[in-house]
Amino acid sequence: MFSYRHAFHAGNHADVLKHAILIHTLDYFNRKDAPYWVVDTHAGAGLYSLDSDWAAKTSEFADGIGRLWEAPDLPPILADYVARIRAYNTNGRLKRYPGSPWLALDAMRPSDRLRLFEMHPTEIDTLVSNLEHQGRTAQRQTTIYGDDGFEGVKALLPPPTRRGMVLIDPSYEDKNDYRRTLITVKECIKRFATGTIAVWYPLVQRREAGEMARHLENLKVKSWLHATLTVKKAAIDGYGLHGSGMFLINPPWTLHDALKPAMPYLARTLGQDERAGFTLQFRENPFPAPKKHSD
Ligand code: SAM
């Protein structure tokens, strides 16, 4: 069940899309003083060494963050993202890559709270030990649960501050993850209708991936944003990731404009063949005025 290790994939094209959006969203939250919560249902190990045997084996980061590392003309949302990764690589060489928990902590203020779920026994140990090397403030504001994030998130919503974001980022190795993600999104909306909910998913040759995206777009929510990045043509054998998508409910209103120049840039820069491309949609749903009751 737990064969997935994010260390093989850290910094790849999918992380670029997901983490650039995560950073932009939290920077947007920081515009107001009111504290917020971030719940990361699938946290991973938190921090990855890019010269580990694992990362070196696939070198996926080379075709992700690696292609943006020296780029002089990054659109602002990508420049912000690369700047955050540079802070982990102060000698200018790309050696370390932060996962979503660390990128969240970098953005968060001391009054904000981070809640992390991770189920892989080794990843939890690494996550806990990585957190021990963070400052006291980070330790105080973070709680790590070795539980199922799909289930565990429900008890945390709504956050006491009534502001926040849920990141749902499973590996989808188990095809039930598509169904469970959709159920979890619905549970999050029920408990925290004003929260930002971000779902990452892979573009793979699987019926469930397309179906989940269609279901997400049909949810009755105030607004959503859906971005997909394709980097290459789908493999003939149906295996492998040819791109990924991010679906956000209640996205920051700045995100669509920020992604307009960034998505074509990513398709051009991270694209590996002629099938590289992107989609970007934003929808605001009008809601009917509440019915008036007459006694
Ligand atoms: N969010 C991380 C990031 O962006 O840096 C990457 C997460 S990785 C794609 C998915 C993680 O979820 C893996 O570390 C895996 O062990 C963990 N996992 C798998 N099933 C889980 C579950 N039901 N609840 C919590 N974590 C789970």
Image (cartoon, rainbow, N blue to C red):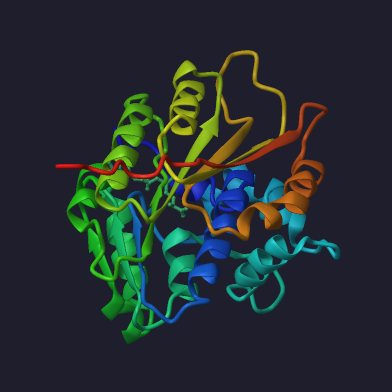
Asked where in the image residue 65 lies, by quadrant, the reply is bottom right
Furthest toward the front, the residue is 295
Q: Position of residue 9 (x, y in %)?
A: 54, 45
Q: Is residue 225 visible?
A: yes
Furthest toward the left, the residue is 295
Q: Position of residue 269 (x, y in %)?
A: 80, 47
- For the point 27% across and 80% down, the residue is 140
Furthest toward the right, the residue is 72
Q: Is residue 59 visible?
A: no
User: Would you place residue 32 above or below residue 129 in this image?
Assistant: below
Of residues 258 and 263, the one drawn nearer to the viewer in this rendering: 258
User: Would you place residue 186 above or below residue 252 in this image?
Assistant: above
Q: Position of residue 286 (x, y in %)?
A: 50, 41
Q: How many marks?
A: 0
Query: From the viewer's perspective, is 159 left or right of 171?
Result: left
Of residues 94 and 280, the one drawn nearer to the viewer in this rendering: 280
- For the point 34% across and 61% down, the residue is 126
Query: From the viewer's perspective, is 60 left or right of 260?
Result: left
Of residues 65 and 254, the one drawn nearer to the viewer in this rendering: 254
Query: From the viewer's perspective, is 277 left or right of 123?
Result: right
Locate the C terminus by quadrant: top left
Furthest toward the top, the residue is 236
User: Would you place residue 245 above or below residue 240 in this image?
Assistant: below
User: Would you place residue 137 above or below residue 170 in this image?
Assistant: below
- For the point 71% across and 46% down, the residue is 63
- For the point 58% across and 58% down, the residue is 253
